Image (cartoon, helix red, strand yellow):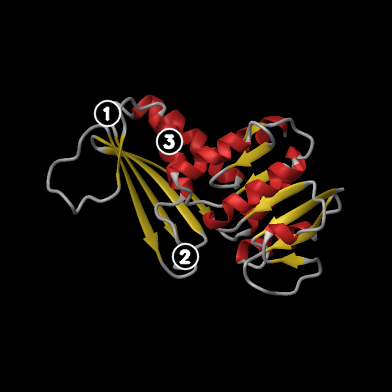
Amino acid sequence: MVKILLNGCLGKMGQAVEACVNEREDIIISCGVDIAKGDRTYPVYTCFVDVREEPDVIVDFSNPLVLDDMLDFALTHKTPVIICTTGFSDAQVEKIKCASKEIPVFYSGNMSLGINVLIALSRMAAKVLSDSFDIEILEKHHNQKIDAPSGTALMIADAISEEKSGAQYVYDRHAYRKKRERNEIGIHSVRGGTIVGEHEVIFAGHDEVVSIKHQAQSKGVFASGAVNAAVFIKDKPAGMYDMTDLLKES
């Protein structure tokens, strides 16, 4: 039985993880951490220094502001951590990488199986098409999402840029007037309503367009991926892990 500490347990994704855990017999939530106050069936703390339980894994769907306290706890207790939060600064990403030298860290901007298939397909398409096709990424999310572009859009762009030499990310075209450069990857964000998450990669060539799209219908797809990652990482050695590693073992 895997015991998890759920960071951000009172948020929408925290509740989705809880619902997913309740449907399984191999994992439980031993405690939660959230800056808000609320009651669950397990103990909820407002900060990591108050936690008394000894979880096997931390699952994080919180806020970048909580990263330092969470990593301090994880490093002190040698607890593996699943980081699903997005919007980290470059300096914070470096802290995550440094932590992975001492503990297992599963870090992914998107925990959906389908999204990771989209990334693999986009990488394949870029390898074949990038020399003669323009590449644009469009992401849509609900009106409560704080960061833009989404961490997933950047994951897609990073995968494509590994196949497209000298790629330049462009987020804002209205700021200048000039023709599109061949090496650009346009990344565009839409925020509105209750859109769970949509990502589309457009390869626009001469007289033809190839489009690869993923649409999440509920937050459950991300919660399920995080729970599977928690079971996967429990006994792993220190290092950085992501959905590719989980899929290979599956």
- Whether residue 216 is visible, yes or no, is no
Quarter occupied by the C terminus: top right
Helix, strand or loop at label 3? It is helix
Give the residue displayed 87% in from the left and 48% down from the top: 1
Amino acid type shown at disc 1: Ser
Q: Kindly indicate whether the residue at mark 2 contacts the one at mark 1 (C-beta within 8 angstroms).
A: no
User: Mark 3 — residue?
Assistant: 158
- What label does residue 145 carry, if any? none
Of residue 228 and residue 202, the one placed in the foreground of this image is 228
Q: Residue at x 45, y 31 (%)?
A: 123
Residue 72 visible, this angle: yes
236 relative to 68, above or below: above
Instruction: Mark 1 or mark 3: name the one nearer the start of the chain.
Output: 1
**Crowd band around label 1 with a 10 angstrom C-alpha radius: few (<14), some (14–19), many (20+):** few
Q: Secondary structure at mark 1?
A: loop
Real-space Cα distance between discs 1 and 2? 34 Å
At a point 57% along the width and 59% down the height, the residue shown is 217
Q: Nearer the viewer, mark 1 or mark 3?
A: 3
Q: Are marks 3 and 2 in contact (CB under 8 Å)?
A: no
Mark 1 and mark 3: span between their CA atoms? Answer: 19 Å
Q: Residues within 10 Å of mark 2 (few under 14, many from 20)?
A: some
Residue 132 circle label: 1
Mark 1 touching mark 3, by CB under 8 A? no
Tag shown at residue 142:
2
Residue sitting at the far left: 177
Amino acid type of the residue tagged 3 in the rendering: Asp
- Identify residue type, mark 2: His
Which tag, 3 or 2, sits closer to the chain's start? 2
Q: Is residue 69 left or right of residue 139?
A: right
Toward the bottom, the furthest residue is 38
Q: In the rendering, at what x and y percent does residue 122 appear?
A: 44, 35
